[in-house]
Image (cartoon, rainbow, N blue to C red):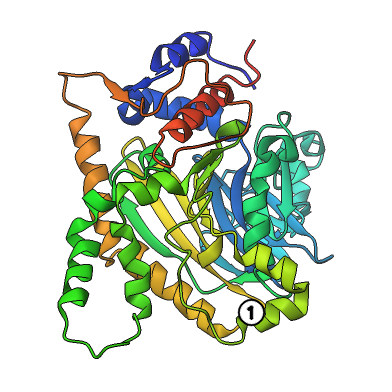
Amino acid sequence: MPHDPDLRTTVNRLIQPQQVHRDVYTSPDVYRLEMKHLFPNCWVYIGHESQVPKPGDYITAQIGDQPLLMVRHSDNQIKVMYNRCPHKGTKIVIDKAGNTGKFFRCPYHAWSFKTDGCLLAIPLKKGYEGTGLDQTEAARGLAPVGDWHNYRGFVFARLAPEGIGFQEFFGDSLSSFDNMVDRSPTGTLRVVGAPLRYMHKCNWKMLVENQTDTCHPMVAHESSAGTAVRIWESMDKPEGTPTPAAMEIIAPFMSPYEFFEGMGIRTWPNGHGHTGVHHSIHSDYSAIPGYWEAMVAAYGEERARAILGENRHNTVYFPNIMIKGPIQQLRNFIPMGPDKTLVESWIFALDGAPSELTARTAMYNRMINAPTSMVGHDDLEMYERAQEGLLADGLEWVNIQRLYEDGEDFGAEAVLNGTTERQMRNQFDAWKRFMLWGAE
């Protein structure tokens, strides 16, 4: 993939060990460079295999600004391709999900393609005889992505035809996906319903950084979680009244700094990391009747205890998703412009587990991540204030220096104080490397 001759100079100017230039959040030029270089070089989440259970089922997605589709082919295998007709460039499908039957048909000129992307038919094909159409890229049909991989049902793709491999890119960070899937007694899970979609007027990286920012909950969420806690504590309740599930979900957001410091943060190479090494806001949820018994029957008591004892908070997978294993959730931060990000919050059901678990997951999603949620609006206001504030000319740099150490090695796993900003520095180290990946 060709690189701009001054790309290295531009990237090096923006990233310093303890701070990053505001242009990484505000500049349309930097955003275009991300779309051209960063996202194609990374492994980016496309969707879950449960979204395409039958041949002909498809979903649409995007990597950076590139439109894609994922489809179940007639041989029951998943395919990932560009959502673009090779004739005139028209998007083949525009719905978020559907079933195309045995083939795709372009809505513009009716070129049709098998669900593996191969060209199937062209109306009035005699008009192309002797023109050399069979020697063009159009004759090859829908273009496949550079590479893709299905990891325990989660499908990722890399647009660049050559680059870092899937296992090398993710490494040990895949343990968070393992824990989420292993929480199912059958070792499988499935998407439940459509996601909550929520447009944010801010740069996509602000949302990614916030997932491991543990110094904001007790401040930014005091207006929502703090109010809920005060109301609950002031209520006249009979002794022994159980804490409602909604309070179990929202109250931990008001945990003190000491709680988050002790929680710990782990970082892995290539920009991945998670909060909640030792405990998290998900550690003390009430037990769901029958779930422990199902896990023991499936895994044995020792293994079941190890799986359910791992309560990681937010695991960030660079560049732009976060998962919560204990609550079976995935959030996708989709860039739509330098100051616009579409957030999709997906929930999953654990096959073989009581439905009450899925109900709690759905409640969490509505309370924390919905456009009408209490907690999500606190974060949204902070993002938008920051996006506006970064346009102020008095200061040019954004500080990410908390618990900084000289000579930090982001090529090695590290476990540190839960309020460190190392994971943010880790993300920008990856940002810089993958922006320049393959550059001479």
Image quadrant in which you'd find residue 55? bottom right
Image quadrant in which you'd find residue 3? top right
Q: Is residue 167 in sight in this rendering?
A: yes
Q: Which residue extends farthest bottom?
A: 238
Circle 1 Cα neighbour tier, 10 Å, few/some/many (<14 / 14–19 / ≥20): some
Query: Where residue 2 sits: x, y (%)?
Result: 62, 18
Q: Quadrant of the C terminus?
A: top right
Q: Quadrant of the N terminus?
A: top right
Vertical placement of residue 240 versus 222, above or below: below
At 16% from the left and 19% from the top, the residue drawn is: 393
What is the three-letter code of the residue carrying label 1? Trp
At 34% from the left and 62% from the top, the residue drawn is: 252
Query: Where residue 292 sits: x, y (%)?
Result: 63, 79
Q: Which residue extends farthest right?
A: 75
Between 411 and 49, the one nearer to me in the picture: 411
Q: Which residue is mark 1?
A: 292
Query: Where residue 145 sits: x, y (%)?
Result: 69, 42
321 left or right, relative to 187: left
Q: Name the element at disc 1.
A: helix
Query: Where residue 18 sits: x, y (%)?
Result: 39, 20
375 left or right, relative to 79: left
Image quadrant in which you'd find residue 238? bottom left
